[in-house]
Image: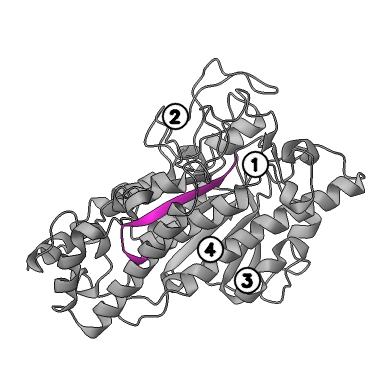
Amino acid sequence: MIPVTRRRLLTTLGLSAAALPFAGGLRAANGNSAAPKRIIFVFTPNGTVPEEFWPDAVGADFAFKRILEPLAEFRERSLLLRGVSNKVRGDGDGHMRGMSCMLTGIELFAGNIQGGSDTPAGWASGLSIDQELKNFLQANEAARTRQGSLTLGVAVPDRADPWTRWSYAGPNQPITPVDDPGQVFQSLYGGMKDKETVGSVLDDVSDELKALAGKVSKEDREVLERHLTHVREFEKRLQAKDDHALRHPVPAPDPRLELVNDKIPEISRAQIDLLAGAFANDTARVATLQYTNSVGQARMTWLGIPEGHHSLSHDPDHAKESHEKLVKINHWFAGEVAHLAKRLASIPEPGGDGTLLDHTTIVWTNELGKGNSHSQDNLPFLLLGGGLGFKTGRFLDLGGVPHNRLWLAIARAFGHEIGQFGNPGLCKDGALELG
């Protein structure tokens, strides 16, 4: 039997190309009745505070410490991995390799970008796991989505270098994260009308969508109305702002210099809402969400912290005041991951098969295990959600395995039976067993 693609079904229902972005999540438009698998990679910078991040007990009997407290309600849906290390070596300093080798698992090219120490380097020499998964899914007509993947950011510097990019379309091909929610909205749904007319992207397709609602099931009508409500409400948020209200100020040329931006919390929530809506509408099944950058110097004044994040991360362990500020910063990041999980958990899966979170895995990580040592051992990896068959409600210590093996496990959970990813020498023991 020839598979019926989503686009073919939507076309059969009488939708134009302009209306397609609003109806991708309908069960009638899904050629596969099973809920799709999805993944979101979340990056936060400058290491964690190990003694306030890692639980005391390994196994199922563990408790989240202070940094992870915002995620307490998701403990049973979490898989916390210690002993996963970035073993990629070669050119570049620890931050550069930590950032640009994280999702790629392979060395940086030789280059002339000088880091804080070690040799200069260039871009990563391979594609990233998010793009590997996107390519795999897009090659399957039944799993193909309109955008394939989303590469989102929050206050990411405009300057492009190995500290600021972690998603790669291929060797020497960094992908710039989009950190303007207005631009993300436009890429998903088209441009808004001007404020004076208070127009909507839905104006030109409202008749089509009303006609569609009369052709589909009650369940699909509810899905459609839920998504259109999301679009209307987000559009109003954007229209209520001045043109640049959600855009971060242009950073200084050196990304290590301090970035002052009180809009980071607002941008973060906007990006999370757009991401959840895009997954609900099956616009993409793969996404990355990047907060600032490696060596990120955001000053989180909304937390009462005037110092730059990176500078604090280099203070010695005995500097108790800095220690507490770093705990507060990482606690805030955990809260944003928790908000993302809550948004996904609040959206029913079309077909009544649980929620989006039941079929979406969030992977939260960092380029360093500890900021003041630049260690790339014991990187903080938290997997949250479902759909990939991993056994959650556990804290595992894996003893220092290459993180390439985690990417192999995730690829295979998607049905992508690759034997290696990134540096082949770091894959010789195969995929991690997380079931």
Q: Which mark is residue 37?
A: none
Which residue is under mark 3? Answer: 394
- Which numbered mark, 1 or 3, is in the foreground of this view? 1
Q: Are marks 1 and 3 in contact (CB under 8 Å)?
A: no
Q: Residues within 10 Å of mark 1 (few under 14, many from 20)?
A: some
Q: From the viewer's perspective, is residue 62 above or below residue 294?
A: below
Expressed as whole percent of the image width and height from the top left, the position of residue 393 reads 60, 74
| Quarter assignment of residue 235 | bottom left
Which is more N-terminal, label 3 or label 2? 2
Q: Residue 416 in the image: state x and y as whole percent.
A: 33, 55
Query: Residue shown at 42%/47% (left/top)?
Result: 182
SS at mark 2? loop
Residue type beneath disc 4 = Leu
Amino acid type at image mark 1: Asn
- Helix, strand or loop under label 4: helix
Query: Could you say which disc has been placed on residue 125 in the image?
Result: 2
Q: Relative to residue 121, is residue 433 depicted above or below?
A: below
* Label 4 to label 2: alpha-carbon separation: 31 Å
Q: How many neighbours does mark 2 have within 10 angstroms: few (below 14), some (14-19), or many (20 or more)?
A: many
Q: Which residue is mark 1?
A: 261
* Range covered by the magenta-colored residues: 280-292
Q: CA distance from mark 2 to mark 3?
A: 34 Å
Q: Few, some or many C-alpha atoms within 10 Å of disc 4 (few <14, some 14-19, many ≥20)? A: many
Q: Is residue 175 magenta?
A: no
- At 69% across and 36% down in the image, what residue appears? 297
Q: Nearer the viewer, residue 377 or 202?
A: 202
Q: Is residue 215 visible?
A: yes
Q: Which residue is mark 4?
A: 340
